[in-house]
Amino acid sequence: MRRLFLVSAWLFLASLLPGLLAAQDVKTHVDQGIANCEAGKFDQAMKDFNAGLKMKPKDPALYDYRGMVYRCKGQNDKAIQDFNKAMELDPKFARAYRNRGMVYFDLGEFDKALTDLKKAQSLGHKIDEDFLKMVARKAAEKK
């Protein structure tokens, strides 16, 4: 009876191991991607985040990270697509709204930027009030 319990317990733990290892692998890719992005190695960062997405294709944070790399590379359409995907996967993912808002700001689409930044703020992401006022002013001037 004890042997059966030990075998069952071992099989249960062994069944959890691949998931734990995969989670660690994704974290490794994220950590490497962030480090490469900070070092300006955007192509390598893109490879890191893509590898993470292959393992965890429904993780909104990975789309958000990859979107930031696209933004750094000046590929704003692709960045917006990734931020949209992150928000599709998790409509309350505040950072994706903030990051998409920053792309819209870069593009001079201040009304869209303001909408996204306010949404991010309403979801708990800290947005500098002076920056929000400036974006609101630019949006009003553009109308």
Image (cartoon, rainbow, N blue to C red):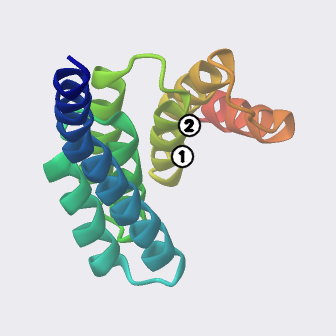
* Mark 1 vs mark 2: in front: 2
Q: Is residue 82 above or below residue 69?
A: above
Q: Which mark is residue 102?
A: 1
Q: Horizontal and vertical percent for residue 25?
A: 30, 59
For this view, does 83 lie left or right of residue 7?
right
For this view, does 116 lie left or right of residue 8?
right
> Is residue 108 or residue 82 the one in the foreground?
82
Secondary structure state at the residue bearing disc 2? helix
Residues packed near mark 1 inside 10 Å, few (<14), some (14 to 19) or many (20 plus)? many
Residue drawn at x 74%, y 35% as measured from the top left:
127
Q: Which mark is residue 45?
A: none
> Is residue 72 or residue 92 the one in the foreground?
92
Residues packed near mark 2 inside 10 Å, few (<14), some (14 to 19) or many (20 plus)? many
Q: Is label 1 in contact with label 2 (beta carbons under 8 Å)?
A: yes
Quarter of the picture containing the C terminus is top right
Residue drawn at x 39%, y 68% as measured from the top left:
33
Secondary structure state at the residue bearing disc 1? helix
For this view, does 99 lie left or right of residue 17?
right
Q: Horizontal and vertical percent for residue 63?
A: 31, 45
In which quarter of the view is residue 4 placed?
top left
Residue located farthest toward the front when viewing the structure as drawn = 1
Q: Horizontal and vertical percent for residue 15?
A: 17, 35
Residue located farthest toward the right when viewing the structure as drawn = 130
Q: Is residue 110 above or below residue 78?
A: above
Q: Which mark is residue 98?
A: 2
Q: Is residue 54 above or below residue 48?
A: above
Residue drawn at x 56%, y 37% as measured from the top left:
98
Residue 35 seen in render: yes
Q: Amino acid at mark 2?
A: Arg
Q: Amino acid at mark 1?
A: Met
